[in-house]
Each structure stands twice: as structure tokens, then as C-alpha cells.
Image (cartoon, rainbow, N blue to C red):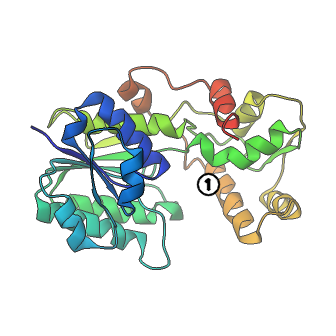
Amino acid sequence: MTTYAVTGVTGKFGGAAMGYLAQLVPAANIVGLARNTEKAAALVPAGVTVRSGDYTKPDELAQSLAGVDRLLLVSSLPSRFMPRSQQHQNVIDAAQQAGVSYIAYTSFPHADTTTALLAKDHQYTEKAITAAGLAHSFLRNNWYLENEMAFLQARAAGQPFVYSAGTGTVGWALEREYAEAAARVLAEAAGDARTVYEFSGPARTYADLAAAIPGEFPVEEVSDAEFTKRLVAGGMDPRLAQFQTATQTMIRNGILAPTTTDLADVLGRPVTPLTEAVKEVLARD
């Protein structure tokens, strides 16, 4: 009997992956890991075992991973209390100690070659998993459409659609689709999963995204400086505005350009068309 585990099951990605995994393998064979086990117990499918999964507590993690064969490590959020790279290292060390035989890790697009600063922790984690000698799959997820939530809501309300990414392409897909693909890879029979998946939707530009949003609004391509200025003028924190602008630059430079059909292939169907995906995201408001 194979035992599966998913980290971060109280989060959006981990929770969605857990739900899909329970449709693919018996719930009794699944362990859900979370810092807040009480919250997790109320969220996971019936039959799933909940254990403590705090990335900052390696000894506790090793106990929680006892008996687990296949682990989905959902990347954590950066923390001022412990570097994300160390959090991930703790999980990897615990997995080794517990005898976990396989890890699927949610990584960054083209992590082995990208120069994006956002990829630094993911590059570290991929190397750490490889160095640990664990069988693995790196799930290099492109951009979640939900990352554009604030912009989608504003444009749907008729405000100008402003971007500086030019004709750079992105592989937008819904977070739930990436989560389902992760669950499907985890549920693969031992030895059947590939070591790298470059998950993304079809290549789309911001002009394509604007066309997929319902309603009438002006569309403006501007410089990075003007983009930042507009965000700050609209009330966004300057540091967040700089981050959003850096993302536009990253996209313009082709760092998120899709290169495979891996996501659709693993799902066994095309990803949700952009127009429908936008409607789904907006409906959550």
C-alpha cells in the first residue's frame, strides 16, 4: 500500500491538491500536513489523516512523515522568521529521515536556467532534493491567473488596463489546474513520473488578457516607470508597485514564456480557455 502526503493543506494550492488526490487514491492512504491541524481536519476530505506540518520544525516533520512513500512539497511563503530555503531544507531532511521515497515539488518555470530573482529559493530546493538522492518530480508552475486578481477586478469595473510587459508571453492557468496536475503526478505509479514538468497554459500576452476581460475599458501599453507611477497613484504601496513592475519586466523579457504542453498533457484535456478562466476568477469576488 502506497501512502501519500501533501504539505500546506490549509492553503489554496495544498488544499486543492489534496481534494484532487482524494479522487485518485483512497483517502485512507493520504496524510495531510499543516501547521494548524485543527483547521486542516475541518477542511480535508473524510478519511484523510491529518498531522502536524510546520516547515520550521524538522524533528516534528520527521515524525509526521513516518510511513509516507510519496510527498507533495508545496513551496512555502517567504518568512522573516526563517528563510524559505531553510524551510524547504527542513522538509527534505525530514523526508530523508522518515524514509520517504519520492518528492514532487512546486517550483519555478525553467528553474535550472532562469535568471529571475524569484527563482532563487526554488533553485536551491531543486538542488537540495537532487543532492538528497530522492526520486523526484519538479513541477515548474508558470503564472496563476489568480495573480492578476486585483487587475482583473479593476478592469472589469471599467478602469484602464495598463501594462508594461509588451508582447512578452505568460502561461496563465487557474491555480486549481496546477493543483490537479500536481495531484495526478503524485498519484502516478512509482517510476512513471518524469523528473521535470514545465506546467503552463498556452502562451498569452497582456493584450490577450485584456481581450478576455468582459466590459469596455481603455488598454494602454506604457513604460515600466509609468506603470509604477500609475499603481502608486492608484493607492498601491510603492514597494508592492515595484514588485508588480518587476513582474512586468520579467514577462517582457520572456522569463515566463511557455515552452511545453505538459499541463494539458497531465490533465488529459486543454486548460480552461482564458475568457472562461477570467470569468471564474472574477466570480470569486
Q: Is residue 210 above or below residue 138?
A: above
Which residue appears at 13% of the width and 40% of the height? 2
Which residue appears at 18% of the width and 65% of the height? 62
Q: Is residue 206 visible?
A: yes
User: Among all residues in the image, which is located at the extreme top?
Assistant: 269
Quarter assignment of residue 55: bottom left
Residue 175, percent from left and from top: 51, 40
Front-most of residues 133 and 45: 45
Label 1 sits on residue = 250
Provide the secondary structure element on which disc 1 rests: helix
Q: 10 Å neighbourhood of mark 1: few (<14), some, or many (≥20)?
A: many
Q: Amino acid at mark 1?
A: Met
Q: Is residue 271 above or below residue 98?
A: above
Residue 249, percent from left and from top: 67, 55
Q: Quadrant of the C terminus?
A: top right
In screen coordinates, is 195 left or right of 254? left
In screen coordinates, is 167 left or right of 82? right
Residue 160, percent from left and from top: 88, 43
In screen coordinates, is 251 left or right of 221? left
Residue 140, percent from left and from top: 41, 46
Front-most of residues 212 and 195: 212
Front-most of residues 28 and 62: 28
Q: Is residue 259 visible?
A: no
Which residue appears at 26% of the width and 43% of the height? 195
Q: Is residue 143 above or below residue 275?
A: below
Q: Quadrant of the N terminus?
A: top left
Q: How many marks?
A: 1
Q: Is residue 58 above or below residue 270?
A: below
User: Among all residues in the image, which is located at the extreme bottom?
Assistant: 81
Which residue appears at 20% of the width and 67% of the height? 93
